Image: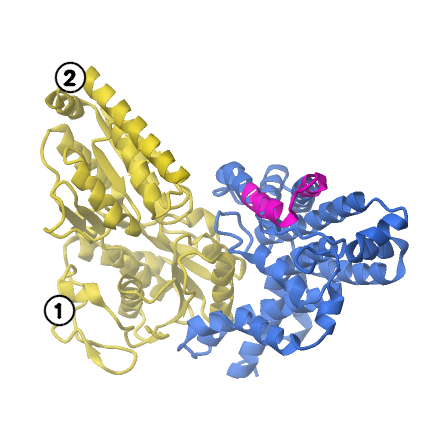
Amino acid sequence: MSHDPLIIVLIAMIGGAIRVSTPFMFVALGECLTEKSGRINLGLEGTLVLGAMLAYATAYQTGSPWLGILAGGAAGVFLGSLHGYLCKLPKVNDIAVGIAMMSFGIGLAFFFGKPYIQPQAPRLPAIPLGGWTGVPQLAEALQINPLFLVGIAAAIVMAWAFANTKWGLIIRTTGDSAAAARAMGVSVDWVRYLATTIGGFLAGVGGSFLSLSYPGSWNEGLSSGQGLMAVALVIFARWSPIRCVMAALLFGAAGALGPSLQSVGITQGYYLFNAAPYILTLLILIASSGSQQAFRAAPGELSITK
Amino acid sequence: MLTMAGVNRRKFLQTTAASAAGLTLGTASFRAARAATDLTVGVIYVGARDDFGWNQAHAVAVQALKGVPGVKVVEEENVPETDAVAKTMESMINLDGAALILPTSFGYYSPFMIEEAKSHPDVQFRHAAPLWTDKDPKNAGSYFAFLDQAHYIDGVAAGAASVSGKLGFVAAKPIGIVLRNINSFLLGARTVNPKATCQVIFTGEWSLPVREAEATNALVDAGCDLITCHVDGPKVVIQTAESRGVKTCGHNASQAPLAPKGFVTGAEYKWITIYKGFAELLGKGQPLPNITFGGYDKDMVQNTPYGAGATDKARMAADAAIKDLKAGKPIWTTAVKDNKGQVVLPNAPYDNYAPDLNSMTYLIEGVIGSAS
């Protein structure tokens, strides 16, 4: 069974979805929250990298990867609240601040991360859920990291809260019409500040997954643009937390396609297969671009839709 | 316009500083005399000095160079292969008084280093890739080491240490130097286990940690029980393989600490041989050769001390093969086929430095993968 090339590729894609998707998921959820409140934070790539660095450093210094996750989140809170504060100032453009925060986060991470490239920090333990299958490849693919489950839970909670709670309503109102929110007596700036800060926290936690779980080390080339892709995934997922998770899973699975096809002997055209995630994204975007739903889902206050 | 002004001012400041230094020191010959007793070497890296890879291999050697009396080293890391490297060289020459510049990344060569060499004829430039030709400035040159010889030794040890005979290779791009390392690796393995195969996955980039981890996982899932690689920083590959419980061989620098259970050995550069040679020649006031190269026989490559993954058989076989290489015995002794069935290298045996070996465009029989 486990020698059929198709099965091998499928197992690799399931494994890839589980292994690679988590950082995309966290950054996309964080961005989803921020954008729902009517602001765009393009700086999450910087948050991801700084979160990864700080998580690794903390895990190394304290010996606890769990404290590392918190430190990664704290890095996100710092950058997110800075973004939120700066955008409260008059005539400040959130996209420009986001790009500045991206460079700032990456720069800080590289500067303070130097001494942590060499040492080895303890990694997050994984939960082996595939032992029952008896197939080593499948057992390996089902090594599930707790953060993956936390990410899915967070998406469900977010989706529920947006639809069913007062806070959800306040965030959505702020995102759709600042004037309506003000009429409700809500401080628009404050809501957006909080949404950006919590969004930053989530992205920072996503970064800690990169350095503490998979690939599980700190170096300066760690992220290779995953934070930026995740921001794009939010638009692709039409601002729905559940669809953010699905988009992240799809992206992870497509990313595993290139290496696993080579491993079963399909060795031609791997540059094309390596581009599979992006090609897939484009195809789905084109397929869904005709629907009016895409525009209806976009928060009305976003500077890209205004 | 503003940027231009900035650059000009920087140039102006540097030139002023340099001429001020020139005035204080007196004539140019005095400066040369100073260089004979007190040599400043400028080393430029494209990435982090401690990347467990290419840059670290250079940085370790530079560290040893600092211990040479009369040698002062200035270093700059994370210098992109752009105009930035020209500015770094300018500042090392004009502000630090460097008499020897060692730009260690491939893309620094042309036009940046060539232009600097033309405008600073009294400074020596040596670049770490086989690019110099006699049309280039005479104060420039190339140095490089044949790491394929150490990968061959990796292969000998791997062939003995692997139980399944299925070896895995995570490679960046299918270019000549990478293909040569893959081929030499399998050739070495087949001297011990004639049935050994080597499965290759190309990631397409020099540094892409997530895809390198995915490739390592895919190779282990395909049944490989020993993984090696040719990417810029092998840290992720070695760590992922170790966590999957398979053995590993390293690349570029020592990755032994990353894999306490499965590390066998690794192909390492020994740049210190070249660097010390340069420092000694300059110290004596003698000219540097334009081209310096070598392998095991010239002590320019080495293998990482054996790790826990190396069986006794692997150690003995690799030790014997190292002895042969040091004696200059050729690796490519018979004609081989590529993995499409074509005969390549028909005029075997080849000397280990034969030009035919420099331009490999194929993977040999037994390698599972495609070179194009």
Q: Which chain is yellow?
A: B
Quick one: B247 or A72, which is closer to the camera? A72
Name the side, left or right, on which A133 lies relative to B246.
right
Q: Is residue B328 magenta?
A: no
Residue for badge 2: B26
For the point 48% across and 74% down, the residue is A273
The chain identifier of the residue carrying mark 1 reads B
User: Where residue A296 appears, x then y in whole percent?
Assistant: 75, 68
Q: Furthest residue to the front?
A: B1
For the point 16% across and 62% down, the residue is B330
User: Where residue A124 appears, x then y in whole percent?
Assistant: 64, 52
Here the colouring is: by chain
The chain identifier of the residue carrying mark 2 reads B
* Numbered range of the magenta stretch: A83-105
Q: Is residue A100 magenta?
A: yes
Q: Nearer the viewer, mark 1 or mark 2?
A: 2
User: Where residue B95 appears, x then y in whole percent?
Assistant: 29, 27
Name the side, left or right, on which B137 lies relative to A117.
left
Question: Does the residue at mark 1 contact the one at mark 2 (Cβ under 8 Å)?
Answer: no
Quick one: B163 or B252, which is closer to the camera? B252
For the point 31% across and 65% down, the residue is B182
Quadrant location of residue A55?
A: top right
